[in-house]
Amino acid sequence: MSLLLGHSPKLFIRKPVLVRASAGRSSSPLQTPPCFVCGEDPCGPDHVELSFAYATRFYPKLIKKAPVELVYNDASDAAVTTIGSSHGWVASLMHDVGTLRLHDDLNPVASNSDPKRILLPPLVTLPHCQTQIITNVSLSSPSPEEEDCVVAVKFLGHQLSFCRPASQSNSKWFNIKIDNPCFFSSRVMFSKRHNMFRLPGAGGQLIGSWDLCEDKHTPKFQELRYHNLPELSKAERETMHSCFTSEHLVESRSTGETFLVKLFRQTVDGTSLKVKGTKLKTKGVMVFKVDDHGNAVYTQDIGDLAIFLSKSEPFCVRASSFPGVIPNQVNILDVREVAFFKLTDSSIISYTHRIKAPYFFPPQNIEY
């Protein structure tokens, strides 16, 4: 289960990684509610005008422009592909030069006239790894312009890479090779509570945590023990066994709780996952509260919290702090589906809809 270190983390972490206190200001009226791009209209040859579900409803002036290439880039020969989002920053892969770039163009409150684009160092591919297919990205703090912000990129397969974009003297990638195949398709997230980047293993049996402030060549592993599992009917078990399952770690920064969310989805019309453009529909969701001792307790009650899963880093907010957000609910956004799972009665509302930018954006300060 070892992670092989490519370079010592001491080279680029000089002090603990911190997240701004503003990330917890969910009661502030100067923050947008969680939102996503729900509409785009041409406003020139190279730009589109974006509107945002939830945010535009309560803040009508949040209509902004973005480059066409960041919204319409799903063609196989696209020169630029958006590959993930974190804290409102969208990451794109520029295939011709093999580099990543962070944009705030799709952030609902970012400047139209002066968008920020941060070019990351050229990617370094470890032996027997690949850097063309990316699982997701994660930022340790709200802005990559902060000195100690670390960007983590999880590639499909062995490789996990970190860099510190704002470093003046040492902005380069530090690469880790993952041996355990249960982490090959995992999504990386940053835990403020643990001050670590974390990976949930496939099947939800393990969580691997990488402490960037300690010079260790292996991560910390946490083995999960499940409790209070629900009794399922034969039909329910058969449905879940036929589903594509993914695991997502989510941290509530307002309550300090950690949740493991298991998402069960089926292909529509029996098509294969290998077929490009395959439609997936959510059939079930299971949420577990995870403590520091590895206990994962099934729950149908997360109180006033709402969880948001998309191609962005997952996040959680207090529903009562934002108009239109429903408590005790998991909100799901994918390229061809918008779904809402109510934990209380396990009911699902699912809509088939083409989403060009399938990213939930966490609350943003309007004075940003």
Image (spheres, helix red, strand yellow):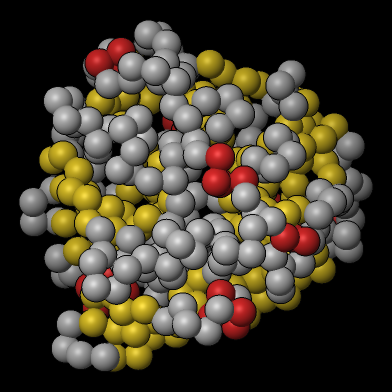
Q: Quadrant of residue 226?
A: top right
Side (left or right) of 250 relative to 336: right
| Image location of residue 326, percent across then percent down | 76, 67
Q: Residue at x 42, y 11 (%)?
A: 214
| Image location of residue 360, percent across then percent down | 52, 63
Side (left or right) of 113 relative to 221: left
> Front-most of 340 and 56?
56
| Count of labels in the image | 0
Please determine whether, in this image, residue 39 is positioned above or below residue 186.
below
Please determine whether, in this image, residue 227 is positioned above or below residue 107.
above
| Residue 98 can be seen in this image | yes
Q: Quadrant of residue 185?
A: top left
Q: Residue furthest left?
A: 97
Q: Residue at x 70, y 42 (%)?
A: 254
> Front-most of 24 and 329?
24
Please determine whether, in this image, residue 32 is positioned above or below residue 130.
below
* Quarter of the figure with the C terminus: bottom left
Q: Residue at x 71, y 71 (%)?
A: 323
> Front-most of 327 and 269?
327
| Image location of residue 201, percent across then percent down | 55, 33
| Residue 239 can be seen in this image | no
